[in-house]
Image (cartoon, rainbow, N blue to C red):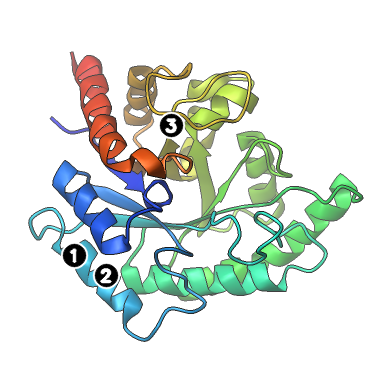
């Protein structure tokens, strides 16, 4: 028996494979969904040739014996916009034009693919800036993205990240409230992050985010620091996490997020779905 939500795997953990080969591995392993990170080496939304997005859509539609794989669009490519500064510019930087163009284009790609959402982060506050300044920039820029997403019938999901201006689920919920809780804007929750920064742990964070939860990332992690690890190599109770997702009625994509493990992708693609299947059997037992 499969869980009521969709099990996926992130292409940022398959960066040593061309995208067709990466999707083939996920299809062969039996995943329901793909978390597609836009940028090199797979699908750069700013330089993709004509027809590239449609070709990816066709491949996704052919997966699962023709039933099609669900997709969420991820935007965490490290050096796409600046070859020297990781993730820069972000939505909290003084000049965010390149980030805004990238996210706008990501929304367009998501619309063409029929993606469940576009997931994005706030960014790390520049060292010489005050929190209030960065937050004001974020709140000033999000309405344009919300408007564009609403026009394209695309959902957005703001991801809290350790060390970023929006670090916790509570931070994210406050941003949503300050913007008037726009229907197209929700949250992404990475369960590994919850071990590091969430006062209520994984269960508390997922339950707090439940009404606006659009996307889930699955990975193990130590409680002490932000380091994505394969299942069984950190402090995550995977069965309890899946049980919470089922209990809150989540029906979206829950995708494995291992961005530093492309070197072992074939093994981890297989091992991760096996671990998820075992954990779900524990839940249903």
Q: CA distance from mark 2 to mark 1?
A: 6 Å
Q: How many marks?
A: 3
N-terminal-most mark, 3 or 2: 2
N-terminal-most mark, 3 or 1: 1
Point out residue 224 in the picture as x, y percentages from the top left corner: 63, 19
Point out residue 105 in the picture as x, y percentages from the top left corner: 51, 74
Name the front one of labels 3 and 1. Answer: 3
Say which residue label 2 marks: 57
Q: Quadrant of the N terminus?
A: top left
Dots 2, 1 in contact, CB < 8 A: yes
Q: CA distance from mark 3 to mark 2?
A: 26 Å
The disc at residue 219 is 3
Please indicate whether residue 51 sits to the left or right of residue 150 in the image: left
The disc at residue 61 is 1
How busy is the neighbourhood of tag 2: few (under 14 within 10 Å), some, or many (20 plus)?
Answer: many
Dots 3, 2 in contact, CB < 8 A: no
Q: Is residue 96 visible?
A: yes
């Amino acid at each position: 028996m499969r869980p009521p939500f969709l099990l996926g795997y992130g292409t940022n953990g398959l960066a040593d494979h061309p995208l067709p080969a990466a999707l083939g591995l996920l299809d062969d392993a039996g995943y329901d969904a793909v978390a597609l990170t836009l940028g090199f080496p797979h699908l750069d939304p700013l330089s993709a040739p004509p027809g590239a997005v449609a070709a990816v859509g066709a491949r996704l539609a052919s997966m699962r014996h023709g039933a099609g794989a669900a997709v969420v669009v991820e935007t965490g490519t490290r050096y796409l916009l600046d070859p020297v500064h990781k993730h820069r510019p972000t939505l909290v930087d003084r000049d965010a034009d390149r980030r805004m163009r990238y996210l706008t284009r990501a929304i367009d790609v998501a619309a063409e693919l029929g993606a469940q959402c576009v997931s994005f982060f706030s960014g790390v506050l520049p060292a010489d800036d005050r929190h209030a300044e960065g937050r004001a920039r974020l709140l000033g820029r999000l309405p344009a993205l919300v408007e564009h997403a609403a026009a394209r019938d695309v959902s957005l999901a703001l991801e809290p990240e350790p060390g970023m201006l929006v670090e916790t689920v509570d931070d994210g919920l406050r941003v949503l409230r300050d913007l008037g809780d726009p229907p197209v804007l929700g949250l992404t929750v990475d369960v590994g992050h919850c071990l590091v920064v969430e006062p209520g742990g994984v269960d508390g964070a997922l339950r707090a985010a439940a009404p606006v939860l659009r996307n889930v990332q699955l990975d193990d992690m130590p409680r002490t620091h932000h380091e994505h690890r394969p299942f069984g190599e950190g402090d995550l109770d995977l069965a309890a996490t899946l049980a919470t997702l089922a209990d809150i009625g989540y029906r979206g994509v829950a995708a494995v997020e291992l961005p530093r493990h492309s070197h072992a992708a074939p093994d981890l693609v297989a091992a991760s779905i096996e671990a998820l299947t075992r954990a779900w059997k524990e839940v249903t037992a």
